[in-house]
């Protein structure tokens, strides 16, 4: 066979292979696009970062508590002895395994409970039991002797708690918590899907430990996330991450059972929320808002196209730390930032203890410590 024939044959084979690869890529893009079923939503014009939102670099003075290679301290709590507890997972991009860590005041780290999955919500009850939200086991109780009881895995309609998230416990023992989704466990691709679809497939719930009964308080939430009771326990707040807002559900008074918006059009993706002694709230954010994402939310076809792109071409979470202090009425009192993301790349979890903010998040590999007594917040 002549060199020319060989060249033509090789060229034909190469073209055939390129066509196969191109067709394969097209089918994959089409499959990914069809897997997304988005709703159209027009986000409000994001707030200008001035006045109470004014930018600063205060969070850059934070120090760090290492986690012995674990990642994602989503919720942070303390026991009576000052030990810190947090749920963690395997790596920034791997949520397949997880533990509850216990960190002493001397920063000694140990595994308190091998959950086998990420644990997002934590709180101690009146009997010093650790109530937790495991992505594998659901709502669980861990006694001081490490005895574990599964309390609830699904709601009244048999929908599973696949991404149980925020948690708080009232003085009467009632347990309040959110579930981000009952359709899929959490992965980074699924997280992107939730953000783009804007579907209400989670909820806010109450668990009665005396009767073991689950009651749905809000059926259908948009990435329901952090949960906290008010100082007087007359209402409960829940962040809705994808809608940039915080909901208020009334537990007492003339509005009992009603839901309203405490604050919307926030400057980022609200995640965790916790209370101060004065009754105001700390709100932690995963990151700031993305103009490109806001721009496509009203266009279902564009969102399907973006979702079909290879992962390296899709929008990434920007490293950007934001914490807001809100009044009970939803007024922004102050803001803390790390606009560089170098020290506090995200602030999805925030808890105040002894005049210090302890800061975590989904992908952060340590806990940040910001000392309030050294920096005037208000």
Image (cartoon, rainbow, N blue to C red):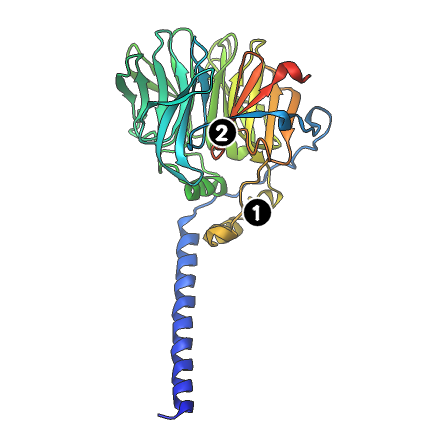
Where, quadrant-wise, is the N terminus in this rendering? bottom left
Q: Is residue 115 visible?
A: yes
Name the residue located 32 percent from the left edge and 27 percent from the top edge: 115
Q: Foreground residue, 72 or 232?
A: 72
Foreground: 110 or 38? 110
Is label 1 in a helix, a strand or a loop?
Answer: helix
Q: Residue at x 65, y 35 (%)?
A: 46
Left or right: residue 311 versus residue 119 is right
- Give the residue number, with chain letter if any, for mark 1: 296
Question: Which quadrant would residue 16 be assigned to in this image?
Answer: bottom left
Query: Is residue 282 depicted above or below 254 in this figure?
Result: below
Comes first in the chain, label 1 or label 2: 1
For image coordinates 36% across by 36% down, the residue present is: 185
Could you tell me residue 300's position as x and y percent?
Answer: 51, 48
On the picture, is 341 further left or further right than 188? right
Q: Which residue is mark 2?
A: 366
From the top left corner, tell me how far across and down residue 173 is, in percent. Answer: 37, 9
Residue in the foreground of this view, choosing between 141 and 68 = 68
């Amino acid at each position: 066979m002549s060199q020319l024939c060989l060249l033509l044959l090789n060229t034909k084979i190469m073209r055939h292979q390129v066509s196969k690869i191109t067709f394969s890529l097209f089918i994959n893009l089409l499959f990914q696009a069809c897997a997304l079923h988005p709703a159209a939503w027009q986000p409000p014009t994001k707030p200008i970062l001035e006045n109470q939102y004014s930018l600063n670099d205060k969070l850059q003075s934070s120090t760090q508590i290492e986690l012995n290679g674990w990642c994602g301290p989503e919720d942070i709590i303390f026991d009576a002895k000052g030990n810190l507890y947090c749920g963690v997972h395997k790596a920034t991009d791997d949520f397949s395994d997880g533990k509850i860590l216990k960190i002493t005041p001397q920063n000694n780290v140990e595994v308190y409970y091998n959950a086998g999955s990420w644990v997002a919500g934590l709180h101690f009850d009146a009997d010093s039991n650790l109530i937790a939200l495991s992505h594998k086991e659901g709502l669980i109780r861990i006694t001081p002797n490490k005895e574990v009881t599964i309390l609830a895995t699904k709601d009244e309609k048999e929908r599973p708690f696949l991404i149980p998230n925020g948690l708080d416990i009232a003085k009467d023992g009632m347990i309040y918590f959110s579930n981000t989704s009952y359709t899929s466990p959490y992965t980074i691709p699924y997280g992107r899907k939730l953000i783009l679809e804007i579907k209400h497939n989670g909820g806010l719930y109450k668990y009665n430990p005396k009767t073991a009964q689950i009651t749905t308080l809000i059926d259908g939430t948009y990435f329901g996330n952090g949960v906290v009771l008010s100082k007087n326990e007359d209402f409960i707040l829940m962040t809705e991450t994808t809608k940039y807002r915080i909901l208020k559900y009334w537990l007492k008074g003339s509005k009992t059972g009603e839901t309203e918006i405490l604050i919307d059009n926030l400057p980022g993706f609200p995640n965790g929320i916790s209370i101060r002694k004065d009754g105001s709230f700390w709100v932690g954010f995963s990151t700031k808002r993305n103009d490109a994402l806001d721009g496509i939310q009203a266009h279902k076809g564009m969102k399907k196209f973006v979702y079909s792109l290879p992962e390296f071409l899709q929008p990434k979470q920007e490293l950007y730390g934001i914490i807001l202090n809100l009044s009970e009425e939803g007024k922004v009192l102050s803001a803390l930032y790390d606009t560089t993301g170098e020290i506090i790349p995200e602030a999805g979890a925030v808890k105040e203890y002894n005049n210090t903010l302890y800061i975590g998040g989904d992908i952060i590999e340590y806990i940040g410590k910001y000392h309030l007594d050294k920096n005037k917040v208000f």
